[in-house]
Image (cartoon, grey):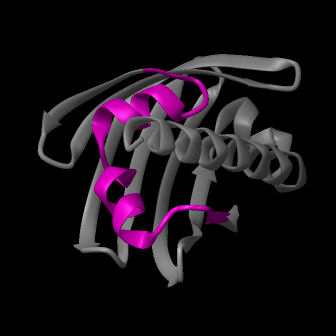
Amino acid sequence: MLVKGNSTLDLPIQQVWKHILDRSILESVTPGITELKELEPNKYEAISDIKLGPVKGSFKGKLNVHDICESESFVLSLVQNSNIGSAQADIEVMLKSNGDQTEVVYSGKANLTGVLGRLGQRVLGGVVNSLAKQFFGDFEKKVKEIDK
């Protein structure tokens, strides 16, 4: 399944970069995340509860951040397992400055198994877009709150 999208944040790129990889912020604004435990720099154990329509599951697995190019880009790699299937994804995240705003562009591939895989790309694509919109909105609010 292809994953792609973008969001424009009403924050300058330096402010976005300062917080985009902050574990405590990510844990508080990522939909479904109940715990994000740092194992070592840029490597985490993630526990989440996700509901996709009638399907609900608790996920546990690894999240790694790599290929970091400061203030420009990074790659998120995750492997998550649950009672409803598993997800493996590699998502490239790029930041583009636009004055006092930052455009965040993400793209990559996700492989899904089990019930998740059977839901199909069309259904999951809408869910991914909805979760991304929620994440970026909550991220922007949190950063503005912290940096008052």
Q: Is residue 54 magenta?
A: no
Would you place residue 90 above or below residue 130 in this image? below
> Which image quadrant for residue 69?
bottom left
> Which image quadrant for residue 1?
bottom right
The x, y position of residue 105, in whole percent, is: 59, 73
In front: 100, or 104? Answer: 100
Taking the spot 21% from the left edge, 44% from the top edge, the residue there is 43
Direction from residue 88 to residue 42 in the image, left or right: left
The x, y position of residue 136, in whole percent, is: 61, 49
Direction from residue 75 to residue 114 in the image, left or right: right
Taking the spot 57% from the left edge, 72% from the top edge, the residue there is 101
Q: Is residue 33 magenta?
A: yes
Taking the spot 50% from the left edge, 55% from the top edge, the residue there is 89
The number of callouts visible is 0
The x, y position of residue 97, in whole percent, is: 49, 81
Would you place residue 88 above or below residue 2 in this image? above
Direction from residue 44 to residue 55 in the image, left or right: right
In front: 2, or 141? Answer: 141
Q: Which residue is at the far front?
A: 148
Would you place residue 135 above or below residue 125 in this image? above
**In this picture, which residue range is highlighted in magenta?**
8-34
Would you place residue 43 above or below residue 34 in this image? below
Q: Which residue is at the far left?
A: 40
The x, y position of residue 130, in whole percent, is: 78, 45
In front: 26, or 97? Answer: 97
User: In the rendered image, which quarter contains the C terminus?
Assistant: top left
